[in-house]
Structures are given as structure tokens and as C-alpha cells.
Amino acid sequence: MPLINSVFKHREFSGDLTSLAEYERSGGYNGLKATLAMTPDDAQYAFHRSGLRGRGGAGFPMGRKASFLPKDTGRPTYIVCNADESEPGTFKDREIIEKNPFQLIEGISIAAHAVGCERAYIYIRGEYECQAKVLDGALMQARAAGRLGPDALGPGRAFDITLYRGAGAYICGEETALLESLEGKRGQPRLKPPFPAVAGLYGSPTLINNVETLSALPPIMHRGADWYAAMGNEKSPGTKVFSVSGHVMKPGNYEVVLGDTTLRELIFDMAGGLRDGREFKACWPGGSSVPVLGSASLDVALDYEALQAAGTFLGSGGCIVMDDSGCIVRASLRLAQFYRHESCGKCTPCREGTGWMAKILARMVEGEGRMEDLDLLESLFGRISGRTLCALADGAVMPVKSAIALFRDDFVRVIHEGSPRPAAMEATVA
């Protein structure tokens, strides 16, 4: 299935899109031109009519989010682009920034006109040093060309973007922890309400969206909201970039029309399938923090509603694939250890619960597991999920809880035999 042109890929153009001149030659900034001809309210309505949903994980409608920002508060309005792409298995924003930074800058400018913003921030993951340099160079080109600065959105309408590098904390992908970090504080979630739309950065109205969401605005505004809404289905319109990794022959980013592609097509047709002689075992379709799926779900459509009906979430689109050479118990331990390490420690259920999850799973993998450990984990899940300020604890529980539900026999075998080696691998070795 071909990629959708003019959303993130300019198939008709092969130039260097890190050059402003080349980006404009390929049709760049036509979306902003169309937006500036509208009133801010009309621009927000176009966002809403397109059906664009946040591509960072939550899937909340972007236009509705923008409409929540209060007007005439006497405070400045800010836009914050969440480029803290730390979800394991997710690397789409990295490629957008690296290969097409001006589409993001244009998208932020479009959003700025719609909400009356003069200053935006891009909060980029600390490990993205190369991508930060690309963005910094693009911002300098945009300022030199007048695309940012005193008259960026029209005569006397100033707008500029500041690039801010994080320090490598997963928790800062959560929007309120990101704001705390951006303000120079320790990156920990805030109590909500108030929500960022009302009291965000420096206590001011703030629109927060991720890279993929904001980068979708230029083609939407150039080609029209109805063009974008016509792709996909009513509740999940448009396209989504899936980052496919793990046991596939062609890992990478693949843009699909939501609802028109199945998980099987993404893995086997687009990402090249599995290695010879291997069979599909499991997949985390939306990053590591979503419930895992087994082979019975391979024909589920890739959209928000279908994946939720299958017992998981679209999330960030980080599709991690495991074949039958992998061990679901060991993978669950690795994920539990990751979330234990990345817990900010502010909420006791998360701080203590993620540690106990990792200890119990480690005991299984080390050959000292007990059958009652499965019941103990189930008891822990209920004491962690839904009891914290942010969703990190839920993200730690869901992959492990779903793995036990779908692959309980694997956990029982590891407990009884004291070996995390998959049965398929034992047969190969024999």
C-alpha cells in the first residue's frame, strides 16, 4: 500500500526538505497562507471539521482541545509542542523532525494563528541531539526569511518558537510534567484540574500537541478539512504513522489511512513480515504501555475504536513485534523494569508498585517463581492502576496484566520449569 503523499511524505519531490527554499518549492507554507486568510475561529473550526485527533497517544480531538483555551484572560497564550518521544517502540516524531522540520514549524504557526499565540516552545527529548540541531537550523532559516519574528503572522503580528531540550526523563512526555520541566522545575505531574488549556505554562492558557499532530495541519489547511476527513472513517479520520520494530524484516515508519489497514497488513505486507521459519507471537501496537495482542488479533483494523474493541489502544503507534523466538515473560520483566526506573516517585502506588512488579517478574525469570506470584501480581495491579496523578502507572500495568491474561501458559511454564526460554527455541536447539 503506498504512503499518503502530502501529509508527511512529499512523493513528488526529492529535494532536501531541511532547506527552507526547497520546502517552499515543494508547496510548503501554502497551508499557513490559507490559514491566515481565515479568522482564528474559522481556523479552529477547520481543525475540528477535519477530525484530527492527537497523535501522541490519548487521541483527543485537536480542534476541541484548541477551543478550550479561554480568551481575553489578560495573560499570554502559549503553544507547546511535545517532542519528548520517549515511549519505547516509537520513533515517528524523530523522523519527521529530522527529514521535514519545516512542516512542524509551519504547523505550529498555523495553530498559533488559530489560538492567538505569540510564543511557542518545542520541548525535545534530550537524547535527540541530532534532531535538535536540525530543528535549530530550521528555526534560524525561518527567522532569517521572516517566517518567524516580528511580522511572522502578518504585519505587526509577531510569532516565534523557542527550542528547549529535555534531560532524558520519560515522565516529561506527560504534558503537565513537561510544563514543570519547561518552567525549570523537577519534571513531575501536576494535579488536574486546572488543565493546561486554562492554566498551563506559567499559569497561562496553553495548547499542547505532539509533533505528528501539529505536522498534519499544513496539508489539512492547504487541501481542506474535508479532504482529510474523507480519509479513514468517521471516528478515526485521516492518516497515522506507525513505527514498526522488533522481529520484522523491514522496521521503519509506515503511514496508513486509519481503518483501511489491518495489523496483519502492516506487519507482513509493509514491514516485510517475520524471519524465515518464525511464527507471530505477540505485538504491542501502540507503544510499550498498551495491552499486548496475540495472533487472534492480527486482522484487527488500525484505528482507535477497532483496537480498543480488541482490548488494546492505538497509543503512539509504536508497533513492537515479537515472533515465537521471544519470551513474553522476559519481555514483561524488561517493560516492568523500564517503568520502575522511569517512575518519578511522586505517587506511592506507582513508586512502590512498579518496583514490586519488577521484583516478582525477576524472580520468575531467575527460576524462583511460585504459582502464587500470578495472584500476587493481579492483586498489585488493582492497587496501582487508576490511583496516580498521571498514566505512567497504568502504562506499567497494562502490558504485564494483558500478557498474563493472553499467555498465562507461558508464565506457568516458566514458573514450573524455571526457564524463560520459549518452547519454540527449545525445539530449535534440540
Image: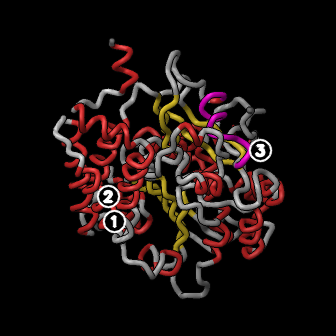
> Which quadrant, please, contains the C terminus?
top left
Crowd rating for badge 3 (residues with CA inside 10 Å; few <14, some 14–19, many 20+)? some
Q: Is 260 inside the magenta-drawn segment?
A: yes
Asked which secondary structure carries label 1, the reply is helix
**Amino acid residing under circle 1:** Gly
Indicate the position of residue 23 as horizontal and vertical percent values: 69, 41
**Amino acid residing under circle 2:** Glu
Indicate the position of residue 262 as horizontal and vertical percent values: 67, 40
Residue contact between numbered discs 1 and 2, judged by CB atoms under 8 Å: yes
Q: Nearer the viewer, residue 48 or 350?
A: 350
The disc label shown at residue 27, or none: 3
Asked which secondary structure carries label 2, the reply is helix
Q: Is 4 inside the magenta-drawn segment?
A: no
Task: Give the residue number, with chain letter if any, for mark 1.
Answer: 382
Q: Earlier in the sequence, mark 2 or mark 3?
A: 3
Indicate the position of residue 324 as horizontal and vertical percent values: 44, 27
Q: Quadrant of residue 428?
A: top left
Spatial CA distance of label 1 from label 3 is: 52 Å
Spatial CA distance of label 2 from label 3 is: 54 Å
What range is drawn magenta here? 259-269
Q: Is residue 147 visible?
A: no
Please state if 387 lies on the left or on the right of 42 as rendered. Answer: left
Task: Give the residue number, with chain letter if any, for mark 2.
Answer: 378
Asked which secondary structure carries label 3, the reply is loop
- Residue drawn where x is 74% and y is 76% of the image: 41
